[in-house]
Amino acid sequence: FAILFALLMNESLRIQKRVVAATVRAAGQTLKGDLYLGEQAQRHTGVETVLDLLQGEEPFFPLVQKGHGTALVPISTVDWISVVNESDAHFSMPGVLEELRGVKVTFNGMAPFSVLLMAVPTPDAPRLLDELNDLYTFVPVMVGKETYVVNARRALWSESSSPKPSSPP
C-alpha cells in the first residue's frame, strides 16, 4: 500500500509541459529556443502562457537552444519575447474583447518599431501614459501575425501616427 501511495503522489506532482518556440531579447542579445510552459496555469483556467511565466515568482526561466544547451534567462533583463501563436503569449478572458492601439516602442540600442498594444477597451479612452502605468511589467503586443510580450518598463513608448506594425530590428 505504501509503495502504491508513493507512486500516486509522485505522478500527481509531475507537471505536464508543452513546448513553445520563442525568440527572446534579453541583456542585449537575441536568443531563439524553446520555452516549456505548463499544461495548466496556476492563476487562471487554461494553459500557462509566456505572460504567466514572466509575471510569476521565479527570477529565471530556462530557454532550451538547439545545439547550444539551455540558457537560464533572468526575467529582469528581458526586453521582449516573441511567439507565433497569440494564445501562447497571453491569456484572454472569455467574452472580453481587446482593442489594439498603435504605439511605437524603442529599446536601448535598437531602432523604434511600431506595435499594436492590446488592452481592454474602456468607455473613456485613456492616455497611453495611463495605460502603461496601470499595466503589469510585461504587456502583450501584436506585430503582424506574431505576438510579443514586452517589458513595458525597459522601453520608451510613444503614440504612433501609423497603425501598421513593424517588426523589431
Image (cartoon, rainbow, N blue to C red):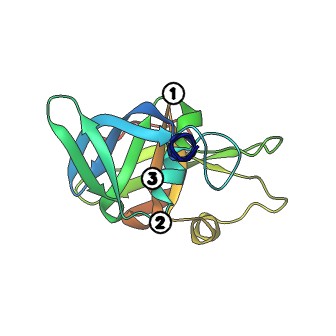
What's under tag 2, amino acid-wise? Glu
With 167 as the anchor, is 31 left or right in this view?
left
Q: CA distance from mark 3 to mark 2?
A: 18 Å
> Would you place residue 108 above or below residue 19 in this image?
below
Mark 1 → mark 3, Cα distance in angstroms: 16 Å
**To which quarter of the image does residue 98 belong?**
top right
The residue where tag 3 is placed is: 150
Please state which amino acid type lies under the numbered disc 1: Lys
Q: Nearer the viewer, residue 83 or 128?
A: 83
Establish if 160 lies above or below 89. below
Asked which secondary structure carries label 1, the reply is: loop
Which label number is shown at residue 145?
Answer: 1
Q: Which amino acid type is marked by label 3?
A: Val
Q: Nearer the viewer, mark 3 or mark 2?
A: 2
The residue that label 2 is drawn on is: 57
Q: Residue at x 58, y 44 (%)?
A: 90
Name the secondary structure under disc 3.
Answer: strand
Instruction: Please state the horizontal and vertical placement of residue 137, each as a whole percent of the image.
Output: 50, 65
Residue at left 22%, top 42%? Answer: 70
